[in-house]
Amino acid sequence: MRTASDVLRNAGENPDNFNFDQQGQDEIFELLLERRGLDGYLSGKITEDKFANNLSKEWAALPKDASGKGFYDGVGSNKSLVGYAETLKMIRGLKENEVETLVQLNYEQKIT
């Protein structure tokens, strides 16, 4: 829970009083996206490839680039589990639907 606590503290939230329900987890998810450059991506300051690379540093299952390899591949049992084309599709969805797209995908992955 260290990552969640850190990101909450950085956002001015007290992790001890934070409700880790679905809504709270979605909030943490959005904060993690912001930490990895969401605003820069949406404003055009960073490319989708750079944003994908940034996200791979947060979630080991995401590829860092078109090679399909994750940033943490080979560290313990970590490896990329999603194709780069699928990752870019999700990232592009942010421009169309902003954060709700990835929040929904995150939720669907949890229930499948």
Image (cartoon, rainbow, N blue to C red):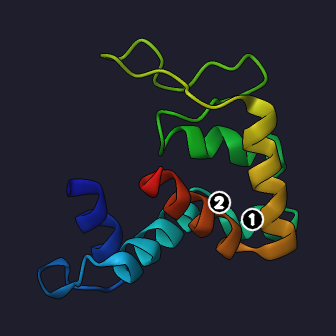
- Mark 2 element type: loop
Q: Splitting the image into 4 quarters, where does residue 76 fall?
A: top left
Which element type, helix, strand or loop, lies under badge 1? helix
Q: Examine the rendered structure and indicate whether residue 48 appears above or below residue 17.
A: above
On screen, residue 83 above or below 75 = below
Q: In this view of the protein, which residue sits in the foreground, 84 or 109? A: 109
Q: Measure how far apart labels 2 and 1 are at the Cα level.
A: 5 Å
Q: Position of residue 95 (x, y in %)?
A: 85, 68
Q: Where in the figure is residue 55, as x and y percent of width and height?
A: 59, 46
Q: Residue furthest top?
A: 74
From the image, tell me which residue sits under label 1. Answer: 40
Q: Amino acid at mark 1?
A: Gly
Judged left or right of residue 100, residue 7 is left
Image quarter of residue 40: bottom right
Residue situated in front as seen by the camera: 31 or 9? 31
Looking at the rendered structure, which numbered label has been put on residue 37? Answer: 2
Q: Residues within 10 Å of mark 1 (few under 14, many from 20)?
A: some
Residue 89 horizontal side relative to residue 19, left or right? right
Q: Residue at x 53, y 71 (%)?
A: 30
> Who's the residue at 64% across and 63% down the image?
102
Residue 50: numbered disc: none
For the point 47% across and 34% down, which residue is it? 60
User: Where 76 sits versus 58, above or below?
Assistant: above
Q: Residue at x 42, y 11 (%)?
A: 74
Left or right: where does residue 80 sit relative to residue 63?
Answer: left
Label 2 close to label 1 by CB (< 8 Å): yes
Q: Residue furthest front?
A: 112
Dot 2 amino acid type: Gly
For the N terminus, give its image quadrant.
bottom left
